[in-house]
Amino acid sequence: MVNRGATTVIASPSEIRGRRAVDYIVSNSSCPTPKITWLALDLASKDSLNNFFHNFCSQFKHLDILINNAGVMFWPYDVTSYGVEYHLGVNHIGPCYLTKLFLDMLKQSKSAKVIFISSGEYIRAKEPINMETPSPEEYNMQDQYATSKLANILYAMALDKRFKSSNMPIKVFSIRPGFIRNTELGRRFSAFLIFLSFPFIWYYSITTKQASQAILHCCLEDDIPSGKLYFNCEIQADGKLLTEENMRDVVCKTDEIIENAFSGT
């Protein structure tokens, strides 16, 4: 996106890593005057979410594309500052709340897009979909991750339907990028386990450049169907979990959690 001249904002909780990413992109960009900046954002923090929104609005007057690319995986039991289980909060509730905050700005764009980065692990989610914060004794990190990524897809489907019915010029997509090497998604794994898994990871994984193609596809193509799940730049068939009933359930629960967690902010 930077190479195409787009003004780009990278948001992350770590300033050191965020600015390092900006410097890397600038130094490798083919654009003569790359326009990219970093803003602080911790999706587990209510204050950080609101501060990011206000900081963004103070610097920029419009928003064309919002990419919700949060990813924590197999995280030890933890709860966000707004009282939601960590996987669900960082991967789903935080991005959905941020999308709501930016809705008026997105409406002003002629062809706005909202993109949720999900995962193929969504197929491991269990029905009925449980979005309540479990006790430490009930906690299963794999279940929580899968549920958060299923919720991404279902909420994206619902948002797209809502925007179409209201004639809003906003398209919504969800993307399954694939099994990607050299990311920090598994940063909570032990170094020994990663070492043992390295040959498997290298053989079956794809590069970040390969994984980004589906994201660029949804960002740049204007004529592709919205409200769909994309993988490798192609629409994925609706699985058994991607039903209207589950979609309504996730939307209702997501909106209720956001209302309870962020009311008065």
Image: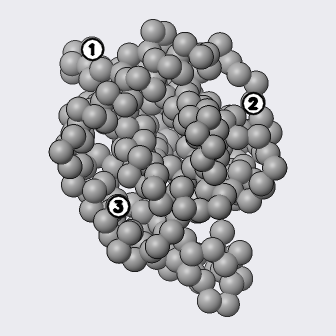
Near-viewer residue (134 or 131): 131
Near-viewer residue (190 or 19): 19
Residue 17, position in %: x, y?
A: 40, 67
Q: Which mark is residue 138?
A: 1
Sooner in the amino-acid sequence: mark 3 or mark 2? 3
In the depicted structure, whether residue 16 falls above or below residue 51 = below
Furthest toward the front, the residue is 166
Label 3 sits on residue: 53
Q: In this view, does 225 lie to the left or right of 89?
A: right
Q: In this view, does 86 lie to the left or right of 243?
A: left
Quadrant containing the N terminus in the rendered view: bottom right
Name the residue at 21% across, 18% down.
Answer: 135
In the depicted structure, whether residue 264 falls above or below residue 13 = above
Furthest toward the top, the residue is 128
Label 2 sits on residue: 236
Q: What distance separates the C-alpha of mark 1 from that of mark 2?
A: 32 Å
